[in-house]
Image (cartoon, helix red, strand yellow):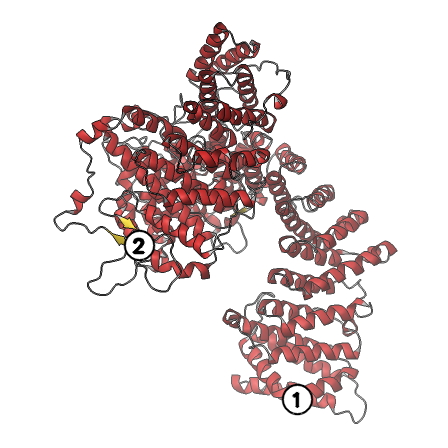
Amino acid sequence: MAAVQVADSLPSGQPREAPREAIPERGNAFRRLSARLCALRPDESSSARTEIHLLFDQLISENYSEGSGVAPEDVSALLVQACRLVPLNQNHLVSKVSQLIHHLLNRLQVIVDEQHLDFLLAYTISAIHQCSSWTHMEILQALAALVYCNGSKCQKYLPELLGKTGLLMKLSDLAQSDPEVRRVAVHCMANLCLSVPGQPYLEEPYQNICFQAFLTILQSPKSSDMDDITFCMLLQNALKGIQSLLNGGRMKLTQTDELGALLAVLKKFMFHGLPGLNIEMPTVLYPTPLPQYDGRTPIKPQQSESSASRPTLNKKKKSKVKPKKIQQGEEEEKESSGEIEAASVTGTGRVNLHEGNTWSPSSLGVQSLPLDGSGAAGKDGVSSPFSSSSWKRVSSSESDYSDAEGGMQSKMRSYQAKVRQGALVCFLSTIKSIEKKVLYGYWSAFIPDTPELGSPQSVSLMTLTLKDPSPKCLANLVSNAPYNRLKLSLLTKVWNQIKPYIRHKDVNVRVSSLTLLGAIVSTHAPLPEVQLLLQQPCSSGLGNSNSATPHLSPPDWWKKAPAGPSLEERSVSSPEGSSEPCWLIRLCISIVVLPKEDSCSGSDAGSAAGSAYEPSPMRLEALQVLALLARGYFSMTQAYLMELGEVICKCMGEADPSIQLHGAKLLEELGTGLIQQYKPDSTVAADQRVPVFLVVMFWTMMLNGPLPRALQNSEHPTLQASACDALSSILPEAFSSLPNDRQILCITVLLGLNDSKNRLVKAATSRALGVYVLFPCLRQDVIFVADTANAILMSLEDKSLNVRAKAAWSLGNLTDTLIVNMETPDPSFQEEFSGLLLLKMLRSAIEASKDKDKVKSNAVRALGNLLHFLQPSHIEKPTFAEIIEESIQALISTVLTEAAMKVRWNACYAMGNVFTNPALPLGTAPWTSQAYSALTSVVTSCKNFKVRIRSAAALSVPGKREQYGSVEQYARIWNALVTALQKSEDTIDFLEFKYCASLRTQICQALIHLLSLASASDLPCIKEILELNGNMVQSYIVQFLKSGAEGDDTGAPHSPQETDQMVRMALKHMGSIQAPAGDTARRTIMGFLEEILAICFESSGSQGALPGLMNQ
């Protein structure tokens, strides 16, 4: 294959930026070396090569740290210049520049921008073609660093890399002689498969190629020339690649053989390296209701559990390992499990630069995307609580595995544990990507069965939970166990078992322990048992002489300039021995903000060079636990509100975007907790809520801190989006009390960010505006509402479905605000609101009602509100006549369409909303019969009973007889409701039966409402239907009167007295109708109603009032 041409893609001399002011010393060193490098010109002389070598060595040896003042674009430009100076015939220099690329991108956490990526990719690919094979490993490491989070920008190189004869396919093949080259090639493929939110996925043909390559690696035995550690790293990369394809790439496993083969290897590697277990799996697992055979080597009877768990390596065997391989293995761990390809925030956090809005309990990497953008993740689909740090290596130096810590044995166990954790995470992604009915056939291979007496117990997930010492396996069990329905003390046992590990000397164990604690506090929260555990004395179970975690301290130890005791300080700063409100919150705060102690310097080398704090994975996990506590146990968390506010300000002021992001997520959870306390249906007593003045202080601190900078940090759009979500969690009662300039800041920033080119930011901004427009202090501001409307309408035209869905939701909220403003005594808002803007909103909502269901459901909601809001002055204008007709036709079409039930429910609700506007010509307009026909069709035949209930409610909205149209139209509605009552139990879906009573209640209300409006001309048709179905209708109305309206989705239930009064009013109305002489219909209907009342009175034992009414 011809080498990629480099010269054509070489960037021409680009102007360098002016030197930045006030940069750290290390940034100055980088800039000095960069300036020297940029001053050089290509020269193949010996002296030039020596100078380049020395410069590269100096750049590599610099002790870089986070916040060193080095801009990502400067790093990319330097790497381009370095490659320009190194011709491809200089193998040693090519190897050195490859090391430089790998080192700088890792240490400085840089993702190469598109401007420089093309040249650097072309250079490295050409280098692999032209340079000696001994350089390939370093070149591939550089390639892996370049393609990380850049897969969507590598499209033109994919045939060269992943084609049938592509470089990575050849170098990752089983025939590859160098095992290290093969491993790094697989690593490159895994990074290419890593998807970034808002960017295109890897094309399907290449997804399939990579999947088959990864699967082949997992199915193949270890070759004789590959050492055990390299093999473990190879397996980790293959597992990561498959997980990326299933999660970020949305790959679907549709073939039975494909799925069965994957499940077989995943089960095998779930037990990789566990002592006493040697799993032999078939090549493919097939779905079956019976347990499948999976052999294992039996444990010798004389071998005890303790001896089985001990490694068999001795010092002699250890000494036989080649030093070169050891060094390579230890060095390669740096990029294998860590800095460059880690898809987790418990790593260095690079993935967080591109994360979506969905935030799972402890997995914020791009591999765990969700979905709805709100703290929706949203909060969509929940990830495993161990899916983040299982990919992340938290140490990056050889000192992690010193002889004092167990040497090669300890290192080997660690690598094997990472393979097991990787297999579990990949298994979780697999089961999320397939339907439950498909998964059911494979249960027997993973869930423990009951074997016959004497037969060996099959190996299952429970075996793993019992055998694997990793706390992450236990975290998975905790996350999926229904502790709310199990006996007490089970969680207490897990809790007490894990607490000593919180201060373990190995940072991997400490991170895993926090992960498990996070799983406990997030499972079915709040649980009384967990609440008691959180209130234990802070020292309980934490005494450990090998502590590497900071000791717990008073709340204000880390503040440089405390402004006085805060609320929680007053509650905690008491004599020694008093109880801490929540020891886990105190521990997590200490981990996040307290400088690390010297005792953890050896095992915590994974923290950034020069960092004074705990390793990044520990701090990120602690922030996630704090967020989970705020979500599930806010009554405890609120005591630390102001202190947590200062923690958030500190985190969002740091240079690491992942720490900033987690700070923003914690802020969002705290804001949401405060909002929940003040909701009308909140069960929190008024004196137990956080006072509004304290909430105002909290948010003033946030808005005077680094939050505004995060909102305007366009280099990190995921952080911007999270900051928008956090800003939308301000308590409305507190927002109105914020300083005026802070209110203006919030509004101005959100309206400005709505123009962002990034879809994540635009979606978050659209949602935040939809929250703000409901604030009581803003909703009557005509200018703000109009500005918000224009911003939302612009987002409704975005190419991104997620942006349009959020914009449609916000449009629905904005139109809710219009309806609320109609109910105020002051008509000024309605008079000042622009008619032209109303027209634009109607047109946009009509178009949105033709969009996907996610957009359509809120578009029809907005249409209903807008048609309700229209004033007679609007309706009289010719310009509105056509748009009103189109709007109602859009609603009718949606009511009848086979869309999602939520869409049809909203359309029926919107139709009822339209009927409430007395200015619309309901009853006389041509669309009247179409609207009623659509609703009657739904009420009699829709499969979903909640939609039927809503359509029946809409049919009972008109308050005047003339609004129901002609006698024939009235008769069709009456007949449809009786038919719907008759069919109220006809369903094939068992889940709909629970709505039967509510459906009958709503239909009975609609029938009585129609009777109370009937005219003399309507009576014959009513009589005719009652003669056919009177007994059935009467029995359901009697049942309705006796029980009152049951709680349903149409509003508050009626009392028996209210329902009785409805029948009395209908009877009174019938008595007032002037029927023609000899007409028996009126008498028949009155007798029908009187008999209903009589039955009810007889059953209740009070008959005094009935004769008087009948005599009337």
- Element carrying mark 1: helix
Q: Are marks 1 and 2 in contact (CB under 8 Å)?
A: no
Q: Position of residue 11 (x, y in %)?
A: 62, 20
Mark 1 nearby-residue class (10 Å; few <14, some 14–19, many ≥20): few
Type of the residue with mark 2: Ser
Q: Is residue 798 visible?
A: yes
Q: Is residue 360 left or right of residue 879?
A: left
Quarter of the C terminus within the rendering: bottom right
* Structural distance between the alpha carbons of marks 1 and 2: 62 Å
Q: Nearer the viewer, residue 651 or 761?
A: 761
User: Seen from this angle, which residue lies furthest bottom?
Assistant: 1078
Relative vertical location of residue 1048 with respect to residue 788 in this rendering, above or below = below
Residue 321 sits in quarter:
top left
Quarter of the N terminus within the rendering: top right
- Element carrying mark 2: loop
Mark 2 nearby-residue class (10 Å; few <14, some 14–19, many ≥20): some
Q: Is residue 339 left or right of residue 701?
A: left
Q: Position of residue 1053 (x, y in %)?
A: 57, 69
Which residue is under mark 1? 1028
Q: Position of residue 1088 (x, y in %)?
A: 65, 87
Q: Position of residue 806 (x, y in %)?
A: 62, 47
Q: Residue 460: which disc?
A: 2
